[in-house]
Image (spheres, rainbow, N blue to C red):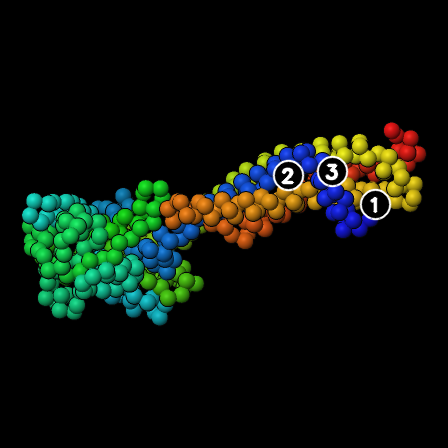
């Protein structure tokens, strides 16, 4: 009994019992389609996560922030200068794997006003390197120049959220004056609008709700101190990140006289959390598909048992002319797999059509992704379901005594 003959018999059984076969294949179709769609949604969700991570600077970004030292060091914290530009300069000298360093000062709720419009928003003093490390791009206008830093010029670049809050839709902000903490600043540029929607929530809204001024301007005109909020570091080689973290920690510990008033953060811990979360979601998706296909397998098994009952005499004739037990066994397993695979193939087509419809109707970040991995898993699950569902009926068919089978009416 070869595979081709078994598949032919399987297709013949589908034609002979159309309604029963269609119902069974429909169960497989639903199982495979639900599995592929669930995996597709998981892939789409984590594609959006990867976009968000990339827009924050990617895995190559290291962020050093000022924190309160441990309780046992707080009595001595005055001996540390805190984060300073000298720290940033020292970090830049670590080695070739440090591509760029960007010291920053942040005020989370800075007052911004123009005429009768007033908001409280994030204001950050930056260097030119901040735009590259943080993945910020200008939509219109110009970025900061050397003269802006040297002269601590009162110039500002607005994110799209701040621009929309302070200016009307048809108003051009370039060249206008905005009051930042009662100090007039001239708008010289606007950042591009960033968007990654999760339903109605924009995961990149924080990139729009920001205003940038030169670091020296922030220090001299607004803050009145030189202590930094952050130092952002860009590493050229991801494999060098652990080494860079150790070097940065050692340098800052020495410069801060042993006071641990800083925190060095990377995206590696987030990446580990991402991998675990993704694995859990995939297991959840596989569980849904497994349950659906289990139901399908029960249907296939019942169909095959009914088919065997109707074909006992056929089994007896085949054994009488020389068919061995394994030939009968293989015949019914192949028929079961054929039934399941046909249903699985229809499920893959259905899933592909549904993904296409959802991609045209849902926002980009909520769209499922049709991956080759999901299709392969769906097809493999359908074939496995056919094998497992056909084993018991095939064993029962192979056990028939040919004489007793020939007597069966």
Q: Residue at x 69, y 36 (%)?
A: 18
Mark 3, Cα crowd under 10 Å, few <14 / some 14-19 / many 20+, is few
| C-alpha gap between disc 1 and disc 2 | 25 Å
Write down the residue under mark 1: 327
- SS assignment at label 2: helix
Give the x, y percent position of residue 358.
Answer: 44, 45
Q: Residue at x 88, y 33 (%)?
A: 405
Give the x, y percent position of residue 340.
Answer: 66, 42
How many numbered circles are shown? 3
Which one is nearer the viewer's eye here, 288 or 122? Answer: 288
Q: Which mark is residue 16?
A: 3
Which of pointers 1 and 2 lies earlier in the amino acid sequence?
Answer: 2
Determine contact: label 2, label 3, CB under 8 Å: no
Q: Residue at x 25, y 57 (%)?
A: 192
The quarter holding residue 144 reads: bottom left
Give the x, y percent position of residue 408.
Answer: 88, 30
Which of pointers 2 and 3 lies earlier in the amino acid sequence?
Answer: 3
Q: Which mark is residue 221?
A: none
Is residue 376 in sight in this rendering? yes
| C-alpha gap between disc 2 and disc 3 | 14 Å
Write down the residue under mark 2: 25
């Amino acid at each position: 009994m070869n595979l081709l003959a078994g598949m032919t018999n399987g297709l013949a059984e589908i034609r002979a019992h159309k309604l029963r076969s269609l119902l069974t294949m429909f169960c497989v179709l639903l199982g495979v389609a639900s599995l592929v769609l669930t995996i597709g949604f998981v892939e789409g969700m984590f594609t959006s996560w990867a976009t968000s991570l990339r827009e924050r600077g990617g895995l190559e970004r290291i962020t050093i922030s000022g924190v309160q030292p441990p309780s046992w060091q707080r009595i001595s914290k005055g001996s540390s200068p805190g984060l300073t530009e000298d720290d940033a300069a020292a970090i830049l000298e670590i080695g070739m794997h440090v591509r760029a360093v960007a010291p920053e000062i942040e005020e989370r709720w800075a007052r911004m006003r123009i005429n009768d419009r007033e908001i409280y928003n994030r204001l950050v003093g930056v260097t030119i390197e901040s735009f590259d490390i943080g993945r910020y791009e200008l939509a219109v206008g110009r970025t900061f120049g050397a003269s802006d830093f040297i002269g601590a010029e009162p110039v500002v670049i607005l994110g799209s959220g701040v621009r929309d809050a302070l200016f009307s839709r048809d108003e051009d902000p370039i060249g206008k004056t905005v009051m930042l903490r009662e100090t007039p600043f001239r708008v010289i540029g606007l950042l591009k609008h960033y968007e990654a929607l999760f339903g109605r929530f924009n995961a990149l809204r924080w990139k729009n709700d920001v205003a940038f001024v030169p670091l020296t301007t922030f220090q001299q005109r607004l803050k009145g101190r030189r202590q930094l909020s952050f130092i952002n570091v860009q590493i050229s080689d991801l494999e060098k990140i652990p080494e860079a973290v150790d070097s940065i920690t050692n340098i800052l510990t020495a410069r801060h006289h042993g006071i641990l008033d800083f925190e060095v953060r990377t995206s590696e811990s987030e990446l580990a959390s991402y991998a675990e979360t993704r694995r859990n979601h995939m297991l959840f998706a596989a569980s849904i598909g497994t349950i659906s296909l289990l139901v399908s397998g029960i249907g296939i098994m019942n169909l095959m048992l009914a088919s065997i009952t109707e074909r006992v005499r056929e089994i007896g004739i085949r054994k009488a002319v020389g068919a061995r037990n394994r030939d009968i066994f293989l015949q019914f397993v192949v028929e079961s797999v054929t039934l399941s695979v046909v249903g699985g193939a229809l499920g893959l087509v259905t899933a592909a059509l549904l993904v296409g419809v959802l991609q045209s109707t849902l926002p980009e970040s909520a769209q499922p992704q049709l991956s080759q991995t999901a299709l392969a898993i769906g097809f493999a699950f359908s074939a496995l379901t056919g094998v497992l569902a056909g084993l018991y009926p095939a064993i029962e068919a192979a056990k028939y005594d040919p004489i007793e089978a020939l007597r069966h009416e």
